[in-house]
Amino acid sequence: MTPSHNIVFSAEALGQLKGGLRGEVLLAGEPGYDQARQVWNNMIDRKPALIVRCRGAGDVIAAVNFARRNNLQVAVRGGGHSVVGHSVCDGGLVIDLSLMKSVRVDPVTQTARAEGGCTWHDVDFETQAFGLAVTGGQVSHTGIGGLTLGGGFGYLARKFGLTIDNLLSVDLVTAEGQLIHASSAENPDLFWAVRGGGGNFGVVTSFEYRLHPLGPIVAGGIAMFPLNQAQSALEFYRDLTETAPDELAVQAIFMTAPPAPFVPPDIQGTKVLTLAMCYAGPIEEGMGYVERIRSFSRPVVDMLGPIPYVVQQSLVDEAARFGQNYYVHGTFSEGLPDGLIEALVAGADNQMTSPGSFILVTPLAGQVARVSREATAYAYREARYSIDVNFGWLDLQESEEQIQAARDLSAVLGAFTTGKSYVNLVAEDDEKGTRTAYPPDTYARLQEVKRKYDPANFFRLNQNIKP
């Protein structure tokens, strides 16, 4: 049975749910309800019938069973960063994992197990206490769940692979309310699918990661260059990234310089190209690349140098802050030809009109490309760059204009990109959009796994793989 929005459940059933939880249930009108239904993208204004704030796998099982028995649509919230709003639903039940934030690090085996409600700050903070790290998102308030299940880009991906390439196992609650374990040895078909297939198969209550020695200090930071230098800066960036060792990751970010103390007053509010660097190797080697970036031109903001990794991971948090309205479209490119560079600079100059918007170029390749495309559901291993148009604005009345500008820019960039998508950056919430994230054979294999573990499509508020 497919969940619907026609909701009827008895006070008795609700009382039984509440009595069987360690967490809490929030209903409309109750204190905390409105705050709990808010998500990263302010355009998403949905009102669930109830929000179950879980404190463990037992609570998740109870919530899944209640939703199934009462024909409720389910949304799963970790960090709440789903651009199209999959973290919350109208009239259904939200399984809120944000209280499940335990991280257990084993420094001997160099592994960590993190609960599904953790953010990347939670994981980085605990692993860095032991000088260890795993590839994770560069915005520290991003939830680990959505990012991991989609694939997982990060500064460390070129050296250590995507987040999913360092995933050892998951615990997952199925649509039938069963807690199962998936790894390369146990339920391997499911383990393959959750490494890139998103939240289609159940609620992941914990993730086990392989860690790597790193930090706590790395060579990294940011340098900002004025927009009138962006063309030559991106050409320099192309040469740098295409000859760089795996240890070096440098993101190129078109953005508006924030009103921050480290930004000179005459630069604040102007458009800049920011190079955000992290070196996953010896600091002295990384400092050589710091000097190479400085040698291109004197930055208007220079925050390059030795930096704590946990700080590195939060440098662009403000650019992707909660409370803005967002439209995001991501795709891949196999290089940075002159035409693409020119289109990016022109887009930043003309279409990027809100101070809350940015355009992000992320280098891939390295260890990402050495993993077989059949090994995980994330299959676009050959891509060298991810190109992310991320437009953010405050006034809802500007939404139509901003969304159209983002689409126009994405269409121009499409002449130089692959037309394929990273599932976490699919702009359109439909089957056509989802299919751009997977080659046909991968999509068909995901459908097989979906038919086995969720044949009724109970978990469908995601980039949905229909059984």
Image: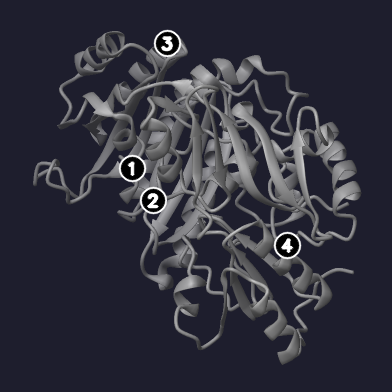
Per the model, the C-alpha gap separating discs 1 and 3 is: 23 Å
Whether residue 416 is visible to the viewer of this picture, yes or no, is no
Q: Which residue is mark 3?
A: 244
Q: Which residue is mark 1?
A: 316
> Mark 4 or mark 2, which is nearer the start of the sequence?
4
Per the model, the C-alpha gap separating discs 2 and 1 is: 7 Å
Q: Which residue is mark 4?
A: 61
Q: Amino acid at mark 1?
A: Val
Q: Amino acid at mark 2?
A: Ala
Residue 156 rendering spot, x and y as whole percentages? 46, 25
> Mark 3 or mark 2, which is nearer the start of the sequence?
3
**In the image shown, does 295 or 64 lie closer to the viewer?**
64
Q: Up-down: is 103 above or below 279?
A: below
Residue shown at the point (65%, 36%) measured from the top left: 419
Looking at this view, name the residue that lies furthest to the bottom. Answer: 11
Left or right: 382 in relation to 284: right
Whether residue 459 is visible to the viewer of this picture, yes or no, is yes
Q: Are marks 2 and 1 in contact (CB under 8 Å)?
A: yes
